Image (cartoon, rainbow, N blue to C red):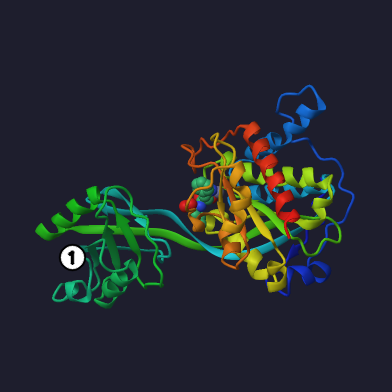
Amino acid sequence: MIRTASKPVSKRLRLSLQIALATTFVSLSTGCVGTANRGAELAPVASAEAQESNEAGSTVQALVNLGPRVAGTPTAEQASQYLIDEYRKAGYQTQVQTFTYSKFRDEGSTITVDGTPLEGQALNGTIAGKATTPLVAVPNVGRPADFANLPVNGRIAIVQRGEIPFTQKAENAAKAGAVGLIIVNTEGGTLRGTLTGKPTIPVVALSRDQGNPLRDRAQAMPTTVSLVVNAEERTITGRNVIAYLDGVTQPTVLIGGHFDSVAGSPGANDNASGTAVTLDLARRMAKTPLARQAWFVAFDGEEDGLKGSRAFVEAAQPQFLSGLKAMLNFDMVGVNQQLQIGGSSSLTAIAQPKASIPKSVVNGSSDHAAFAAKNVPVLFFYRGSDANYHTPNDKTVDPKLLNETSQTAMDIVQQILKVD
Ligand code: BES
Ligand code: ZN
């Protein structure tokens, strides 16, 4: 298998995807040799037609077989290489756009009282740290006045969630001299909060069921706790795989979907399904003149907050983006009968007869949002909620639904490009 040619594109080179194509995006050399048939697990099929219709299913299977494709991991890189190979076999040139971002990881944070560990949840962005001190129950939510006249200096404080941002609670606690802060949830379940600034003390959350008794106890009698916050900020390198026919520098449609998945989930529906439909469209279009109007992108880092699609639009020149009549995003299209298509009204009008058009789409939830934010007309193809979403059970899709999605999208692309 060829691995040598996918030279990454520097994030700094943001001249334009258009100019960049000629100058800074480095083309992969041609001549991809046959690689191991990673879709071989699927049952053999009889006719040529049937064989074709199994291709998207094989793509999902191949991606799922790799394991969870968490951005920045070797598995995600293997997935990107698999996609490069497949696009090249379909006759496309490929580029890898690399980009970096920082990602917080909680590596286990605990609060121990009398030798019994409670399960803490480090707030996103907290510094790591450990301390063993008496615990000070601070009334209310941790406003500056709540700390007045309390012996917080050099000690760990415990406050309630709510009313003011987590960061402010932490800054107020640090100002009062606290060396750590515990925030107790006011709702059932785990509190997964994010700090916006960088407070100087470790901050950890406790569930209501564990936190309230601890606070009551600290109020009633001297209580010593050991706080351990194990967390780190890592720099992740993501990889968008971009495919286009030789010489196509200004597409009119950009078709994509994210190939990364969350930790612990094989991401069959979310989103090997959309990755496979994107590749399937590239294969179908390769046989038609439509291919000269399209770029195909497998986005990375979506699960970390649309990082890949944002990096793409940031690297693109305004003219490249304004030359796009449509960005089509496929996310979770492998389960549920009813295809749904959301997005810009000019385009959903075209898609109308072919799918259910929801009144409102949560725009922030997938890669089309990055394009919509740059005024590119978007269509978002999805099939609604999935019980296996972000779980280890997201491991199968219905190949028929992939083909239906791709056929519908093909019809829509044809219409978009017809209307001028
Ligand atoms: N695939 C989901 C978005 C989605 C949900 C599409 C339901 C279709 C139906 C996506 O990967 C995701 O999990 N998005 C996050 C937000 C993202 C910015 C991390 C979400 O929706 O919470
Ligand atoms: Zn997704």
Q: Quadrant of residue 306?
A: bottom right
Coordinates of residue 151 in the picture (x, y in percent):
16, 72
Q: Quadrant of the N terminus?
A: top right
How many numbered circles does the render carry? 1
- Compared to residue 91, the image places residue 338 above or below, namely above
User: In the image, residue 317 lies at what x, y percent?
Assistant: 70, 72
* Closer to the camera in the image, 185 or 277: 277
Helix, strand, or loop for circle 1? loop
| Residue 53, above or below 310 | above
| One can see residue 30 in this view | yes
Give neighbour class at mark 1: few <14, some 14-19, many 20+ (Cα, 10 Å). Answer: some
The reply, left or right, for residue 383 in relation to residue 17 is left
Across and down, in percent, residue 295 comes to 75, 56
**In front here: 288 or 8?**
288
Instruction: Classify the position of the C terminus by image quarter.
Output: bottom right
Q: Residue at x 66, y 46 (%)?
A: 275
**Residue 75 relative to residue 250: left or right:** left
Residue type indicated by callout 1: Asn
Residue 295 visible? The answer is no
- Residue drawn 14% across the image and 55% down it: 216
Q: Answer with left or right where residue 183 lies relative to residue 71.
A: left
Q: Residue furthest top?
A: 46
Q: Disc 1 marks which residue? A: 140
Q: Residue furthest left?
A: 220
In the rendered image, residue 252, in percent from the top left (x then y), is placed at 74, 60
